Image: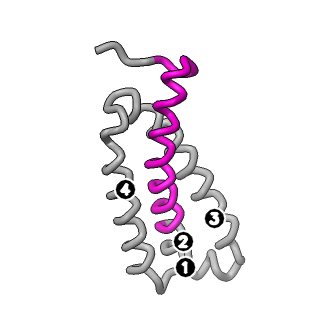
Amino acid sequence: MMQFIETYRLTGVLVGFVTFVIIGLFHPLVIKGEYYFGVKCWWVFALMGTAGTAAAVWFHGNTFVSVSCGVFAFSSFWGVRELFEQKGRVEKGWFPKRKK
């Protein structure tokens, strides 16, 4: 499969698609994470980012997998910051607050 991707020079297109999907998944993950757990789940995103970074280094021989893991890692790190910003948006009333 990787030979097909490299032969037809599709790596950039596939990396773009994977990036689009990963970022698209992280938007609702951050919103739902803040809704159900508040900002105390930040460490889960940090742990996922660390694991993604390690995987990107581990798979250094496969550019597509390594880059995809790197995108996942830094989207996870972005999620940490975004959780705290989401808390501010909830406080402003832009998003619903969970009733406890």
Q: How many marks?
A: 4
Left or right of 31 in this view: 55: left
Which of 44/57 is in front?
A: 44
Q: Residues within 10 Å of mark 2 (few under 14, many from 20)?
A: many
The answer to whether the residue labelled 1 contacts the one labelled 2, judged by CB atoms less than 8 Å apart, is yes
Compared with 95, 50 (above or below) is below
Image disc number at residue 67: 2
Tag 2: residue type?
Val
Counting from the top left corner in percent of width and height, residue 91 is at 49, 22
Q: Which residues are magenta?
A: 69-96
Q: How is the image coloured?
A: one colour
Residue matched to label 1: 63
Rounded to the nearest angstrom, the CA distance separating label 3 from label 4 is 25 Å
Counting from the top left corner in percent of width and height, residue 15 is at 62, 65
Q: Compare marks 2 and 3 and give the one earlier in the sequence.
A: 3
Rounded to the nearest angstrom, the CA distance separating label 4 from label 2 is 18 Å
Counting from the top left corner in percent of width and height, residue 38 is at 35, 32
Rounded to the nearest angstrom, the CA distance separating label 1 from label 3 is 11 Å
Residue matched to label 4: 46
Q: Nearer the viewer, mark 4 or mark 1?
A: 4
Q: Nearer the viewer, mark 1 or mark 3?
A: 1
